[in-house]
Amino acid sequence: MKTSGLAELEAVLAVARHRSFRVAAQDLGLSTSALSYAVAGLEARLGVRLFNRTTRSVSLSQAGAQFVDSVAPALSTIRDAIDQAGSLGATPSGTLRLNTSAGAARQVMPVLIDFLQRYPAMHLDLVTEGRLVDIVADGFDAGIRLNDIVPQDMIAVPFGDRQRFAVVGSPAYFARHAAPRTPLELHQHRCIRARLPSGLLYHWEFERFGETLRINGEGAVTLDEPELMLAAARAGLGLAYLTEWNVAADLAAGTLVRVLEEWTPPLDGLCLYYPGRRHVPAGLRALIQVIREHAEARRA
């Protein structure tokens, strides 16, 4: 049997990860037909079908699941070896794959732009999704999330800014409703509810003088994206609970008004995180240095 190339193995892992030939092809920068041909060629040489395909879904066969479980760790080791050899060069190059949420990506883009401007030979592959993924199993070099949800076995590099949440509403809304003085009074208001990637509704969290409260407010609209929540709040549909970063421009412009500020203490901020038991690629080391420089500049 001919030895399969790394590209074919990467193709199989991408399809297994995304459960879609189309999405996997986009991830790898290939056409769907080229990806299908690569996977079919490997299946022909192995003599087994790795995927069960229908017009609507793709799933691993029993042989495919066993193959992926065996190949994924080995391919990760090979990637590390390639990265380690490349790191001996004077200038970082190659692809850095990061996983984060859309909101976090918007906050850290100035740092990422600075990184790419400093290292033009680097290519950044940034994937945004709400759910927290296993960055090792899914082939990412690092992730960016709030520090309190980062897995404990990861090394975390803070971006330097702590987060606070803010309860906001439009001037028109407060012209019709008295501003709440305590979180418990939110039950008398219309709240713009937030749905988590898990499908659960997020309970607004408050703390003051050691007293903590979690409020499940009622309202006419439930959303899962901060920009949509901002639009709904500006339109006077209710109160929103968002990070200060998301509402800063509206507060400065007066399109939104903040309440209950004394009930929202600082929380841990965003951090870049990566597994500590693997070789750190040169590109990731360079990004870590850029993050630390930005954090130091903000503290100065």
Image (cartoon, helix red, strand yellow):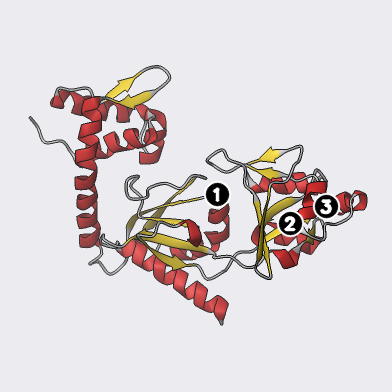
Along the viewing direction, whichever of 7 and 240 lies nearer the viewer = 240
Which is closer to the viewer, label 2 or label 1? Answer: 2
Give neighbour class at mark 1: few <14, some 14-19, many 20+ (Cα, 10 Å): some
Circles 1 and 3: CB distance less than 8 Å? Answer: no
Q: CA distance from mark 2 to mark 1?
A: 21 Å
The furthest residue to the bottom: 300
Q: Looking at the picture, which amino acid does disc 3 mark? A: Ser
From the image, tell me which residue sits under label 3: 170
Q: Where is residue 162, by image quadrant?
A: bottom right
Residue that carries the numbered disc 1 in the rendered image:
102
Instruction: Locate residue 210 relative to residue 182 in the image: left or right.
Output: left
Residue 159: x and y in percent read: 50, 67
Amino acid type at mark 1 = Ala
Q: Of the residues shown, which amino acid type is indicated by label 2?
A: Val
For the C terminus, the quadrant is bottom right
Pick whichever of labels 2 and 1 is earlier in the sequence.
Answer: 1
Q: Nearer the viewer, mark 1 or mark 3?
A: 3
Give the distance between the C-alpha atoms of the residues marked 1 and 3, in whole angstroms: 24 Å
Residue under label 2: 167
- Which residue is at a point 75% across and 57% down the rendered structure image? 183
Write the residue at 53% across / 54% down. Answer: 105
Q: Earlier in the sequence, mark 1 or mark 3?
A: 1
